[in-house]
Amino acid sequence: MTTRTERRPPPKITASYIENAALHYLERFASSRANLRRVLMRKADRSLAHWGGERSDAAQVVDSVIARLAGLGYLDDGAYAEARVRALHRRGGSLRTIRATLAAKGVEAETAEAALETLAESHPVPDRAAAIALARRRRLGPFRAGGKRAEFRDRDLAALGRAGFPWEICRAVIEAEDAAALEEMLAEEQGVTPR
């Protein structure tokens, strides 16, 4: 017969425990201030449920640690937003999806818009470039192998639509002649001569 091992109780809330938890989290993930606060408050809530105490006291400790880490440069919402925008755009995220992702991570609307404006400087129509990237990654439209484009046209349009792209962009990407035409469209948009 096997016995269950009891789970270790969570540590008590101290500034050093919260700071170590924050640093450990930041070693593994980039984060906004609000997202890190949520992560640390979940840890604090587990500790408070076991040991007791006031949530407001734990919140003060978490806020002071976050302020200290931000002062040391470990947390920068602007840099986080710009990096996240670039990564999501490369993967084929629409502007709508990117805004929603940043909002879910607790990035303020002004910071998110500033990061999106930075993206717009390098991509005049960011949604078109992202839709092409998503179509390439998921092999939609002109990137579909086997000559079955017409058969899957509606499904491909729906996939781009669900990803948050405007109808005009979905149609332009899916109905493009071939992948080279899309690459040429991107090159013209960015002011680069196609190969």
Image (tube, helix red, strand yellow):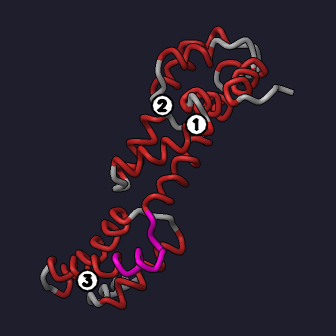
Q: Check contact, mark 3 vs mark 1: CB within 8 A.
A: no
Residue 27 image offset from top left, x and y in percent: 53, 75
Q: Check contact, mark 1 vs mark 2: CB within 8 A.
A: yes
Nearest to viewer (mark 2 / mark 3) = 3
Left or right, residue 24 beside residue 134: left
Q: At 26% across and 78% down in the image, what residue appears? A: 44
- Helix, strand or loop at mark 2: loop
Label number found at residue 92: 1
Q: CA distance from mark 3 to mark 1?
A: 39 Å
- Helix, strand or loop at mark 3: helix
- Helix, strand or loop at mark 1: loop
Q: Which residue is mark 2?
A: 163
Q: Residues within 10 Å of mark 3 (few under 14, many from 20)?
A: many
Label number found at residue 61: 3
Q: Check contact, mark 2 vs mark 3: CB within 8 A.
A: no
The magenta segment is 67-76
Say whether disc 2 or disc 3 marks the residue closer to the N-terminus: 3
Mark 1 is on which residue type? Gly
Q: At 36% across and 88% down in the image, what residue appears? A: 17
Mark 2 is on which residue type? Ala
**How many dots with numbers?**
3
Residue 186 image offset from top left, x and y in percent: 69, 26
Q: CA distance from mark 2 to mark 3?
A: 39 Å
Q: CA distance from mark 1 to mark 2?
A: 9 Å
Q: At 40% across and 51% down in the image, what residue appears? A: 111
Label number found at residue 166: none
